[in-house]
Amino acid sequence: MIRFDKVTKVLGRKIVLDAVDFEVGKGETFVVVGLSGAGKSVTLKHMIRLMRPDSGEVSIDGKIINDLGRMALQELRSKFGVLFQSSALLQWMDVFDNVALPLREHTKMPEKEIKRLVDEKLELLSLGDAGSKLPSDISGGMQKRAGLARAIIMNPEIVLYDEPTSGLDPVTSRRIDELIVNMREQLGITSVVVTHDLHSALAIGTKIMMLHEGRIVENATPVDFIRSKNSTVQSFLESQYITKKGKWEGMLNE
Amino acid sequence: MLVEAIWFMQFAFGKRSKHETVTQFYITGIKSLGVITVVALFTGMILALQTGLELRRYGQEVYIGSAVAVSMIREMGPFMTGLIISASVGSAIAAQIGTMTVSEEISALEVMSINPNRFLVMPRLVALVVMMPILSVYTNILGIMGGALVGTTQLGVSVQAYMDNATQFATNKDLYVGLFKAFLFGIVITTVSCHQGFMTTEGAVGVGRATRSSVIISFLTILVVGYMVTRMFYL
């Protein structure tokens, strides 16, 4: 469904992605992990053509998107919903108007129908009371959920999450994780999640790919990922206290 | 960006863009009136005082009406309005769009297939190109009134003589050229401010830089465009 074929991207003098190859299947929750500056967000931006590769190809549903024209790009992006790291809600609009924006811009739906759909999504994300509030008046967790409501309002096939739990408390983080899992299980949405929170990645991912200095050092199921012999992966696991003792003991020692 | 925004002009008064366009009219027009009133009055007063004192040496102070009116309508009205609007409205546009750029709101619009030029630039462009000539006329009127105030109270010129002189020498061409300049300045301010906003990088520092650049570039462009239009119509 999403395919990167030897994608290379250089920003300034730094090779951010170095001949990256991977595939994301339909209905998967594909998690990209790595340290800061590893190229995770750049990978995400290539999927929606916010960035173009310097070499290599990115294809969605078999169609190469490197050089799409405006109309084709619009059609491509209609398949996606994106939750940005900063939520990216328009600050002068209240939460309801933010979530309703794609419907108002791309459909001729009457306001009554728009209200019904927006209220439905806000309820789904436990934001029923926040519709009339400005983004600056709600917490970071609520902003993330509002951003997610906006991302899924057009019923996209694929949702991209850029650091969905960064800056959130553990309880809210787990709640966002549950939402991502529910999206897959209830709506069959394909998800690509960029995060450096490995606990979150293991909880939600059907596949986990680790990037390090622009290269893929591991791409495996969660179980195979924590059993990886790669030293970078092992050191990343240890840095997040995923060690051979405690909760992970059985899995790591098998 | 400018061409695209003009292409989208038809959407400015559509049902769903009307609110944003009206908001921009309010910000550009109504919220700038206070500072424009003060600046316009004092510009006219200074012009009257400076030219009046020189003309008095030759006993010709009665002509300050024409000097103030022609200067205001041809040059100072649109020029002062352009400077005020670029410093107040233009800087605000650059700061808002710059903040939106660094906080990924522009990327979010693009991902939602909402063209930022239509959504953000076009309502501001419509508001500025319509309001700039109107505000320029307002500046002209207040400037001429300010000149009259100085002329009557400090230079001993009657209101009747001042106004007769003002209307005798200022022509329709002066007014049209002045309005044309104001219209162009509206385009300049919107284009420069939005462009600087979209080009913003590096967080809060970048927003500050974009705001400063938008004011400086707008000021310089207004000066150059003003000179070129004057040269085109009067040389």
Image (cartoon, grey):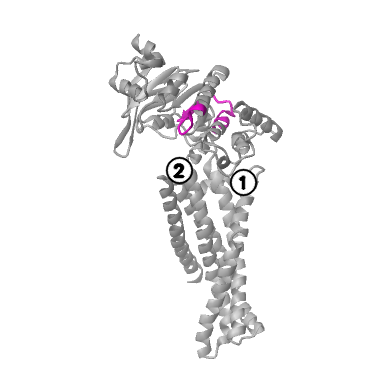
- Which residue is drawn at the image coordinates 49% and 23% (left, top)? A191
Between marks 1 and 2, how big is the CA–CA gap?
Answer: 29 Å
- Which residue is drawn at the image coordinates 64% and 80% (left, top)? B163
Same-chain status of marks 1 and 2: yes
The quadrant holding residue A151 is top right
Front one among B215 and B165: B215
Q: Is residue A248 visible?
A: yes
Q: Amino acid at mark 1?
A: Gln
Front one among A15 and A175: A175
Q: Position of residue A144 (x, y in %)?
A: 53, 33
Number of marks drawn:
2
- Note whether B104 is above or below A162 in the view shown: below
Q: Residue furthest front?
A: A246
Which is in the foreground here, disc 1 or disc 2?
2
Please report the bounds of the magenta region as a residue range: A147-171
Counting other residues with Cα less than 10 Å from the Cα at mark 2, is it few (<14), some (14-19), or many (20 or more)?
many
Q: Position of residue A252 (x, y in %)?
A: 35, 13
Q: Is residue A130 left or right of residue B224?
A: right
Counting other residues with Cα less than 10 Å from the Cα at mark 1, is it few (<14), some (14-19), or many (20 or more)?
few
Q: Amino acid at mark 2?
A: Val
Q: Position of residue B102 (x, y in %)?
A: 45, 43
Q: Is residue A95 left or right of residue A58?
A: right
Q: Position of residue B229 (x, y in %)?
A: 49, 65
Front one among A164 and B195: A164
Q: Earlier in the sequence, mark 1 or mark 2?
A: 1
Label 2, secondary structure: give it.
helix
Label 1, secondary structure: give it.
helix
On residue B102, the disc is: 2
Can you identify the residue that label 1 sits on? B10
- Note whether B68 is above or below B77 in the view shown: below
- Which residue is drawn at the image coordinates 37% and 19% (left, top)? A219
Q: Is residue B68 left or right of residue A227?
A: right
